[in-house]
Image (spheres, rainbow, N blue to C red):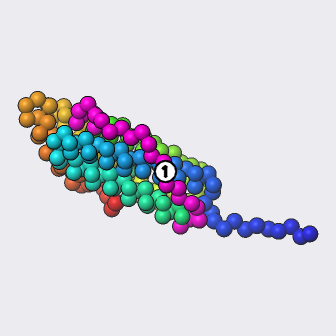
């Protein structure tokens, strides 16, 4: 019997699909995490930080959807992540923004590993797609770091926390203006 030659119907490898689905999980976790933070800020009276985080949660969901569409367009299967155990209680507003900074650094590492993987297997299509996330992470880390710095610059005594909460609202435009070619969400 003649040997049948099977032509792959996609260039996306199983390993890359798995890594992209892991990134989907991380973006989904970010969205849930920031929603939980928004709720804590809201009930604690930090109205500006709450609005900032409600918006940020939605942005992270859009990041997840961007990956969903790419995986499916490339012939893979984007899987909705199981998200449990999301931290919902915080000792202070400072802790919220320190957690965001540490979380975003982990997201950056994950994106970098994904980009490195794509480059190493010469999947330049996915490599190119991921550049949007590389730029986005630069902006998000800057934003979180600037927020954490406010606590030392302004101080938390007296009207300090109220002032910090208000200043948080100004950070998005600052970070966007310093991110160079800022990607749209
Ligand atoms: Fe989409 Fe903040 O990582």
Residue 115 shows in this picture: no
Magenta residues span 73-96
What residue do we see at 53% from left, 67% from top? 73
Can residue 82 be found in the magenta stretch?
yes
168 relative to 7, above or below: above
Residue 77 shows in this picture: yes
10 relative to 116, above or below: below
Q: Position of residue 74 (x, y in %)?
A: 56, 65
Looking at the rendered image, the quarter that the C terminus falls into is bottom left
**Number of numbered discs visible in the structure rendering:** 1
Q: Position of residue 31 (x, y in %)?
A: 36, 50
What residue do we see at 76% from left, 67% from top? 6
Residue that mark 1 sits on: 81
- Horizontal side of residue 14 vs 23, given as left or right: right
Circle 1 residues within 10 Å: few <14, some 14–19, many ≥20: some
Can residue 20 be found in the magenta stretch?
no
| Residue at the left extreme, as displayed | 158
- Horizontal side of residue 12 vs 130, given as left or right: right
Secondary structure mostly taken by the magenta-highlighted segment of the chain: loop
Callout 1: CB less than 8 Å from ligand 1:
no
Q: Position of residue 152 (x, y in %)?
A: 18, 31
Q: Position of residue 35 (x, y in %)?
A: 31, 48
What residue do we see at 11% from left, 39% from top? 162
Secondary structure at numbered mark 1:
loop
Looking at the rendered image, the quarter that the N terminus falls into is bottom right
| Residue at the right extreme, as displayed | 1
24 relative to 163, above or below: below
What residue do we see at 30% from left, 35% from top? 89
Name the residue nearer the viewer: 88 or 159.
88
């Amino acid at each position: 019997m003649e040997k049948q030659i099977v032509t792959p119907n996609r260039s996306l490898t199983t390993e890359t699909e798995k890594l992209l689905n892991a990134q989907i999980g991380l973006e989904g976790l970010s969205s849930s995490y920031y929603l939980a933070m928004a709720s804590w800020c809201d009930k604690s009276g930090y109205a500006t930080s709450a609005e900032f985080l409600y918006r940020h949660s939605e942005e992270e969901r859009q990041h997840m959807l961007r990956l969903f569409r790419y995986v499916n367009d490339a012939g893979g299967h984007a899987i909705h992540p199981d998200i449990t155990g999301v931290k919902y209680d915080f000792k202070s507003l400072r802790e919220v923004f320190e957690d965001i900074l540490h979380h975003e650094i982990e997201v950056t590492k994950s994106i970098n590993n994904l980009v490195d993987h794509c480059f190493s297997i010469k999947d330049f299509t996915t490599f190119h797609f991921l550049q949007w996330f590389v730029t986005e992470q630069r902006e998000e880390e800057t934003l979180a770091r600037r927020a954490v710095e406010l606590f030392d610059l302004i101080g938390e005594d007296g009207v300090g926390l109220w002032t910090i909460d208000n200043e948080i609202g100004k950070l998005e435009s600052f970070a966007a203006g310093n991110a160079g070619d800022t990607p749209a969400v």
